[in-house]
Amino acid sequence: MDTKKHKSGFVNIIGCPNVGKSTLMNELVGERLSIITSKAQTTRHRIMGIVSGEDYQIVFSDTPGIIKPLYKLQEKMMQFVISALTDADLFLYITDVFEDIQLEGSYLARLQKTQTPILLLINKIDIASQQQLEESLLKWRERLPMAEIMAISALEKFNIDKIMNRIIEILPEGNAYYSKEEFTDKSERFFVSEIVREKILLNYKKEIPYSVEVIVNSFKEEETIIKIQVDILVERDSQKGIIIGDKGSALKRVGTAARKEMELFFKKKVFLEVFVKVDKDWRSNDTRLKNFGY
């Protein structure tokens, strides 16, 4: 009797901001794990999504977009990227047809030297011309000649199945790392804070979203409802005023949108209380950043 060998491994998703890493991760995992907005630096942590089949388990890891850090929080975010470059069985390097290839030299050098297989995915081909795609292919063949290149559209789900099949082919034989029922390593509180942060990214402009951290103070699940209380931390009193808005209108809008999203995510009624507090210069304070999981 021919029994299929079990395959498992860690697949780390890396790339510059706004190339579609989180959209792709959510398509591959089939759960809305990574927040997706059009703003850069949406993902701040490494978020794992676990996909299990009868004879395989893939542990995907979405990472922050690669940037040159300007303050401590960004330095900590780039530490997540560096750790992702050392512990993978396979890299998914995401770029897109329109990205001006400005990947910081040290990261490119690490990828050029790695013995780990690389699947280089050129995203957004649904809105590109054939010529743009061919130019992008030529550039990347030169930059990362050892990588296997695929053209995809994460948004249109084009070639997603093909990527999944190729990942399973490449992964080494091994036992599952997690229970087959699990789909992430993150807690429910983590997703509450990410959902609130996404609504802030969507509702406020300029520097505000990048000065915000969301702390979940309580998460109480009862039979018919989940009661949640969160604090939105900002760095300045002026930012607090902007988050709250005229007579609390902006905060109410964020709270309502976040509550609706949580009800979809948890498949249960949610009561959400949101407060705004000032925590001066939290982005530059090592102790505070450690407390927030960076």
Image (cartoon, helix red, strand yellow):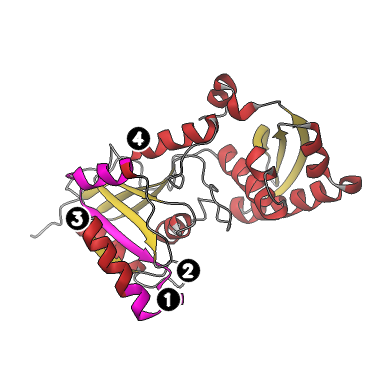
Instruction: Looking at the image, tell me whether mark 4 or mark 2 is earlier in sequence order.
Output: 4
Instruction: Mark 1 vs mark 2: give the one in front.
Output: 1
Image: magenta residue range: 106-133
Three-letter residue code for mark 2: Leu
Looking at the rendered structure, the secondary structure element under dot 1 is loop
Where 95 sits versus 133, above or below? above
Left or right, 256 with reference to 103: right
Instruction: Mark 4 vs mark 1: give the one in front.
Output: 1
Q: Which quadrant holds the N terminus?
A: bottom left
Q: Could you say where residue 155 lies in the image, as x and y percent from the top left?
A: 47, 68
Q: Are marks 3 and 2 in contact (CB under 8 Å)?
A: no
Instruction: Give the distance between the C-alpha atoms of the residues marked 4 and 1, in whole angstroms.
Output: 33 Å
Instruction: Looking at the image, tell me whether mark 1 or mark 2 is earlier in sequence order.
Output: 1
Three-letter residue code for mark 1: Ala
Q: Is residue 121 magenta?
A: yes
Instruction: Give the distance between the C-alpha atoms of the residues marked 1 and 2, in whole angstroms.
Output: 13 Å
Instruction: Mark 3 vs mark 4: give the one in front.
Output: 4
Instruction: Looking at the image, tell me whether mark 3 or mark 4 is earlier in sequence order.
Output: 4
The crowd level at tag 4 (other Cα within 10 Å; few <14, some 14-19, many 20+) is few
Left or right, 9 with reference to 268: left
Looking at the rendered structure, the secondary structure element under dot 2 is loop
Instruction: Give the distance between the C-alpha atoms of the residues marked 3 and 2, in whole angstroms.
Output: 24 Å
Where 152 sits versus 148, above or below? below
Checking the image for residue 128, the label placed there is 1
Checking the image for residue 83, the label placed there is 4
Instruction: Give the distance between the C-alpha atoms of the residues marked 4 and 2, in whole angstroms.
Output: 28 Å
Instruction: Looking at the image, tell me whether mark 3 or mark 2 is earlier in sequence order.
Output: 2
Three-letter residue code for mark 4: Ser
